[in-house]
Amino acid sequence: MKCTAILAMVGILFLNACGSALPQASATPAPTPTYAWNPQGWNLVWSDEFDGTTINPKNWVFDKGGNGWGNVEMEYYTDRPENARVESGNLIIEARQEKYEGLAYTSARLNSRGLQEFQYGRIEARMKLPFGQGIWPAFWMLGSNASWPLGGEMDIMEYVGKTPDTVYQTVHGPGYSGNKGVGSHFVLGADTLKNDFHIYAIEWAPNEIRWFVDAQEVFKMTPAQIPTGTQWVYDHPFFIILNLAVGGGWPGFPDDTTVFPQQLLVDYVRVYQKPGN
């Protein structure tokens, strides 16, 4: 989610400039929106099911402000219920077109830093995505041991409204951050992304990260795939981030076709680990 960093690439493709043409992925059948994942060999070590009436302060804190977050974003992130709340078993992160603290949009960004941090395991969320030009939701993780990009970043799912049928998977580290982030993308159908819930996950182990959309593995990273001479920095605890940005150097900015409010709905976030993690 850092900068247009998150321009994802098919195979391993390094983009030289923000706004470069997106690579073409081969057509892939849309996964089933819900499926029965068999967690044999995995233990559920933490989850937030969003079944209560409020956002749990033992799990999440709010990033607040309107400084663009290094991405030329246009929203002011707040901790108001108008922008983030729990309703009907879902976390709702809502982007609104409204004047607030000198900006034209509001939204929310939640993170689990210092509260729920994990090293290795399966990290997944079941979500229904917002849509529209300039809309940019993300489910991602940052290393808690150092500042960005030294601590690393794992983007489990990102979406930008200008490519309405595509979700992106990316890593960033020292020497391959920003527009040199390394990753891939996965093509579904635009209608299923905005109308259906899907499960987005990584299975993260020493020297390997695998990305999943529903039951399908869509990308894999190992130290052999990062640029020569750079570091693999995915061997320490990371925390989770959920946010909905408006505008930015990568997604572009809202226009007359963009409908507000937009909502990112999160049914749950779960973390599984195998014995010995």
Image (cartoon, rainbow, N blue to C red):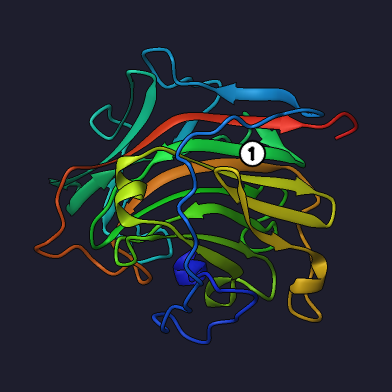
Taking the spot 49% from the left edge, 47% from the top edge, the residue there is: 31
- Indicate the position of residue 179 as horizontal and vertical percent values: 52, 76
Label 1 packing within 10 angstroms: few (<14), some (14-19), many (20+): many
Q: In the picture shown, does residue 180 fall above or below 72? A: below
Residue bearing the label numbered 1: 123
* Closer-to-camera residue (230/190): 190
Q: In the drawing, does residue 96 fall left or right of residue 36?
A: left
Which of the 4 image quarters holds residue 238?
A: top right
Foreground residue among 9 and 226: 9
Tell whether 276 sits left or right of 168: right
Across and down, in percent, residue 162 comes to 29, 67
**Would residue 144 be seen by someone viewing this image from the given angle?**
no
Residue furthest out toward the front: 29
Res. 70 image quadrant: bottom left
| Residue 249: quarter of image | bottom left
Q: Is residue 264 above or below residue 30?
A: above
